[in-house]
Structure formats: structure tokens, C-alpha cells
Image: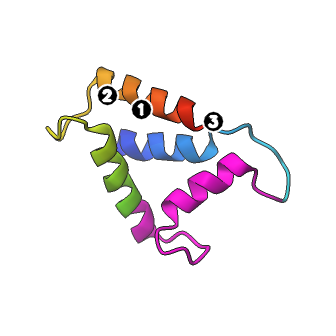
Amino acid sequence: MVWIKTLFIFLLSYSSISFSEELNEEEKMYFNFVDLNNDEVISYEEIEQSLNLLFQIIDLNQDNKISQNEIYELKDIIKSLR
């Protein structure tokens, strides 16, 4: 599960790192994905829920394991969102 948290953090920070005071559109999208109750803050519980959701989305065959092929699928999804 640690690598999933790492992946999640990577997704949140993946967009080009800028030192702007405002979030860019991609960063807003990731933030909104995690802010499940739309209160404009992210709680630890929301991170846990988002990680679980993300794991379920990636684990296409629902075997509670993520294969390299499933990661390739994830990369394709991320690419299509850009």
C-alpha cells in the first residue's frame, strides 16, 4: 500500500511544478479528485478513501493486486485526461 500512496502523491504533484500562488487546471483536477466532499480541504480520511478508490480503479480484474498491465492502463487513462 505504500507504493500506492507514493503513486497518489506523484499524481498530485505530477503536473509541472510551478511556484505560482494558484493551482493550474491539472492540479485542480487532482485536488478535486481527492476532495470527496467538496469542502475545499483534503482530510486524511479523504486521502485514504481516494487511495482505496484509485486502487479499485487500477485493479481492473479485482484480484487485489496491481499488475504491470494495469499500470499501463492507468498511464493511458492519465494521458487521455491531459
Give, as a three-letter code, the residue at label 2: Glu
Number of the front mark, 3 or 2: 3
Q: Identify the residue under disc 3.
A: 82
- Give coordinates of residue 36: x percent, y percent: 46, 68
Using residue 63 as the reference point, say whether residue 78 is left or right of it. Answer: right
Q: Amino acid type of disc 3?
A: Arg
75 falls in the magenta region: no
Asked if marks 1 and 2 touch (Cβ < 8 Å), the reply is: yes
Residue 70 in picture, x, y percent from top left: 31, 28
Q: Nearer the viewer, residue 25 or 8?
A: 25
How was this image coloured?
A: rainbow
Q: Dot 2 corresponds to which residue?
A: 70
Q: Amino acid at mark 1?
A: Leu
Q: Are marks 1 and 3 in contact (CB under 8 Å)?
A: no
The reply to whether residue 1 is visible in this rendering is: no
Q: Which residue is mark 1?
A: 74
56 relative position to 38: left or right = left
Quadrant in which the C terminus is drawn: top right
In the rendered image, residue 74, in percent from the top left (x then y), is placed at 41, 32
Q: Residue furthest bottom?
A: 39
Whole-percent x, y for residue 27 in the image: 67, 50
Q: Secondary structure at mark 1?
A: helix
> Which residue lies most toward the left here?
63
Q: CA distance from mark 1 to mark 2?
A: 6 Å
User: In the rendered view, does 8 fall on the left or right side of 79?
Assistant: left
Q: Is residue 31 magenta?
A: yes
Residue in view at x 58 percent, y 48 percent? 12
Q: Residues within 10 Å of mark 1 (few under 14, many from 20)?
A: some
What span is colored magenta in the figure?
Answer: 22-48
In the image: residue 40, left or right of residue 33: right
The residue sitting at 72% across, 50% down in the picture is 25
